[in-house]
Image: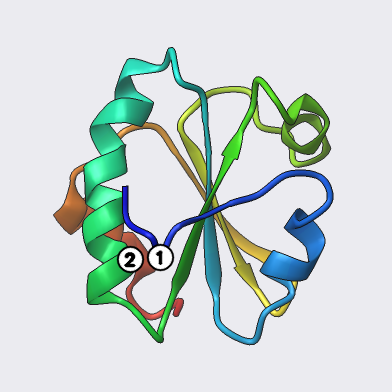
């Protein structure tokens, strides 16, 4: 996994998403097949969009309260934060081109 992707928990989440740089947070679990499939895409995007977008991950097994707080009911769910505010939500596996298209104009 890319060293550009931060792993967040309840202690680090708020400060990470309050960044001036938009932050995409991937809610995932180790047992989730689609989560494993999207991980390399997020790794690539963390490099391609470096400086424009930060990418972080939250393990829902270890941080269920964060998942509940943001209404995450299915994984993978990716939440886009701008200036600490939730700007968009993307649910489910998608290919790189689709995810980049959804992010275009929002970062």
Give the crowd class for mark 2: few <14, some 14-19, many >=20 residues within 10 Å.
Answer: many
In this view, the residue in front, 91 or 47, is: 47
Give the structural element (helix, strand or loop) at label 1.
loop
Farthest top residue? 31
Q: Is residue 15 above or below residue 83?
A: above
- Side of 26 relative to 15 (left or right): left
**Percent position of residue 13, x then y:** 74, 55
User: Mark 1 or mark 2, which is nearer the start of the sequence?
Assistant: 1
**Percent position of residue 107, x then y:** 44, 80
**Percent position of residue 49, x then y:** 30, 76
- Residue visible at 54% across and 23% down in the picture: 74
Q: CA distance from mark 2 to mark 1?
A: 6 Å
Residue indicated by mark 1: 4
Q: Is residue 53 above or below residue 98?
A: below
- Residue visible at 16% across and 57% down in the picture: 97
- Residue visible at 44% across and 75% down in the picture: 53
Q: Is residue 102 visible?
A: yes
Residue indicated by mark 2: 46
Residue 14 position by quadrant: bottom right
Tell me if label 2 and label 1 are in contact, CB under 8 Å. yes
Q: Nearer the viewer, mark 2 or mark 1?
A: 1
Residue 10 position by quadrant: top right
């Amino acid at each position: 996994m890319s060293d550009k992707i931060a792993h967040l928990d309840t202690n680090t989440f708020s400060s990470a998403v309050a960044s001036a740089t938009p932050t995409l947070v991937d809610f995932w679990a180790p047992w989730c097949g689609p989560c494993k499939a999207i991980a390399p895409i997020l790794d690539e995007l963390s490099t391609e969009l470096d400086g424009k977008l930060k990418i972080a991950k939250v393990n829902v097994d270890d941080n269920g309260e964060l998942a509940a707080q943001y209404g995450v009911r299915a994984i993978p769910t990716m939440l886009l934060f701008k200036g600490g505010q939730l700007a968009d939500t993307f649910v489910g596996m998608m290919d790189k081109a689709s995810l980049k298209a959804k992010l275009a104009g929002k970062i």
